[in-house]
Image (cartoon, grey):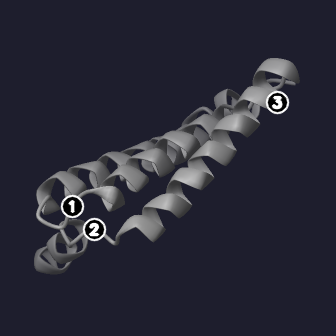
Amino acid sequence: MPSRIEAVLFSEPSGRWSAAVMFAGSLLFLSSYVYFGVLGDSSTAHELFFAVGLALSGIAESLPSERRRTAGGFRIAAMFVFVTLLGLLVFAPEFIVGSR
């Protein structure tokens, strides 16, 4: 099993198309965070987590093919951001959904 995980995490980056899609998603979540969080005065912390996670994934996929370890590091960091969001949903949901 560790060899399969290593093969997926430290594989060659997917390329510019995947990176562009991830950066566009990150920009979408970031603009939604700014619009609803700052201008709409609502709790949108989950959108910030998604924006950061997608940006880290986009950076990983935009690297040159010989930078597999660096891409793997960015992928691990993105997964850490998403797992942190899940942990907050389980242990401190008021942080994510807000107190009403």
Residue 98 spot, x, y in % from top left: 76, 27
Residue 19's image quarter? bottom left
Quadrant where the N terminus is found in the figure: bottom left
Q: Residues within 10 Å of mark 2 (few under 14, many from 20)?
A: many
Q: Are marks 3 and 1 in contact (CB under 8 Å)?
A: no
**Which one is earlier in the sequence, the residue at label 2 or at label 1?**
2
Residue at the location (40% across, 65% down)? 16
Label 1 sits on what residue type? Pro
Q: Nearer the viewer, residue 16 or 94?
A: 16
**Which residue in the protein does label 3 denote?**
36
Q: Are marks 2 and 1 in contact (CB under 8 Å)?
A: yes
The CA span between labels 2 and 1 is: 7 Å
Label 2 sits on what residue type? Pro
**Which residue in the protein does label 1 denote?**
64
Query: Can residue 44 be seen in the rendering of this structure?
Result: yes
Label 3 sits on what residue type? Phe
Residue 13's image quarter? bottom left
The CA span between labels 3 and 1 is: 36 Å
The answer to whether residue 86 is left or right of residue 33 is left
**Which residue in the protein does label 2 denote?**
13
Residue 30's image quarter? top right
Quadrant where the C terminus is found in the figure: top right
Q: Secondary structure at mark 1?
A: loop
Residue at the location (32% across, 45% down)? 77
The CA span between labels 2 and 3 is: 33 Å
Residue 25 spot, x, y in % from top left: 61, 54
Q: Secondary structure at mark 3?
A: helix
Q: Secondary structure at mark 2?
A: loop
Give the answer, above or below, for where 8 lies relative to 77. Answer: below
